[in-house]
Amino acid sequence: MIVKKLSNAIDVKKHLQELGVDGGGVQILTDKAKTHIIYIEDLNVGAANILKQDALSIGADLAVPRGTVLATTPKVNAILIATTAQLKTLAKKELSQPFGLKGLAAILKEYSKIKKPSEVEVMGVINANDDSFFSESRFEKDEAIIQIQKMMEDGATIIDIGGVSSRPNSTPVSADEELSRVKPIIDVINEKELHQQVKFSIDSYEPSVIEYALKSGFSIVNDITGLIDDEVCKVCAKYNATVVIMHMQGNPQTMQDNPQYDNILTDIYSFFEDRIEKADSFGIKNIILDVGIGFGKSLEDNLLLIKHLENFSLLGKKLLVGASRKSMIDAISSSLIKDRLPGTLAIHLESVRNGASILRVHDVAEHIQALRLQSALDEITLKA
């Protein structure tokens, strides 16, 4: 007999198939292999006691505070620990239970359906302004096209073009000035039909700039204000654009002035729900969500969002993370902007593990290499 301890990060489904398990068994065992840890706030104490017993009856568990069984408080917080298979079973059991458990059942059912993205796209950053926080991302017309072509060769599938810095305390500019910066680059992209090879995104919240980009072959709008402007919504719907809805507390001039949240995960989740509903009302069909790392967040906020990114997968949209060379890296490991690539890669790989399917980066080649290596590690199976 030979015994081997396998990593918890393996692709269980592939290992089961390699082992020769029959098709039905593969799915059943795969559902049993992933463990979900779900934090439930303000749970009715009666519901907590019912859920605890139902969870234990199927091999799952619910962690509750001392005194819950005696109902010493009307509401409690709890942590549910269950496999995917157990979540599915528990969701069915709670449908007939009181104290709001029917609503919880619907949420558990959706959590059981969450799957890791099958592919990850890299979005390269091109800044057509002279005050973006990372100087090596700044390019004018001819240099920008050379850099775009290099990013394409390196493996980027999206290129994000912006003409206004959104770094903390950046100076706002007029729509005309913004357009004058990005127009030469957009025009060459259109002339060379580069949008036939990769997707282009306009990093803007100005309707006139966005419309010029979309009518020139761009297909994505990266809006750091999260569709606050109805005119932006109208333009995006008109051109059937994909929209990146980003969360930001305040604006670039104020966002890092002691940002505060009641609960950052639920606050941003509610924000996304509201903005998705708004997008739907304007007829915007394709949406990507960006939690806005560094946009009105403390270091702890940023780390919580990256670690618990899967929380937002329940919204059913692709998740984008852009932490490239940001100051949070310096807050953990003192470094200059030019030396923050290793920290960037660590954050972005963790984001992918937690559900991100698009990474917005300054360093395309390095990210492509890291993602390919990570993919190889995930796909390797122990053959009999």
Image (tube, rainbow, N blue to C red):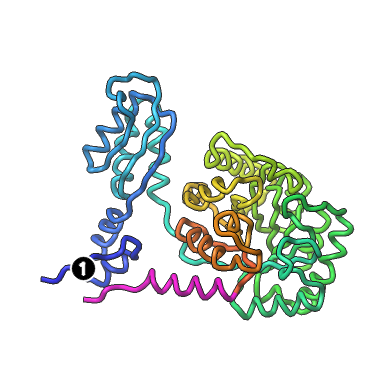
Q: Position of residue 268 (x, y in %)?
A: 58, 42
Tell whether 345 sits left or right of 224: left
- Residue 291 lies left or right of residue 22; in this view the side is right
Callout 1 environment at 10 Å: few (<14), some (14 to 19), or many (20+)?
few
Is 127 in front, or is 13? Answer: 127
Q: Position of residue 338 (x, y in %)?
A: 65, 68
* Residue designated by label 1: 4
> Horizontally, is 209 left or right of 292 in the view?
right
Residue found 87% across the figure and 53% down from its top: 174
Across and down, in percent, residue 373 comes to: 45, 74
Amino acid type at image mark 1: Lys
Placement of 69 over or under 30, stated as above or below: above
At 72% from the left and 70% from the top, the residue drawn is 136
Residue 301 found in image quarter: top right
Question: Predominant secondary structure in magenta?
Answer: helix
Residue 218: x and y in percent read 72, 66
Q: Nearer the viewer, residue 166 or 98?
A: 166
Please identify the quadrant where the N terminus is shown.
bottom left
Between 286 and 343, the one nearer to me in the picture: 343
Q: Is residue 371 magenta?
A: yes
Q: Secondary structure at mark 1?
A: loop
Q: For residue 49: magenta?
A: no
- Residue most extreme to the front: 334
Magenta part of the chain: 365-384
300 to the left or right of 188: left
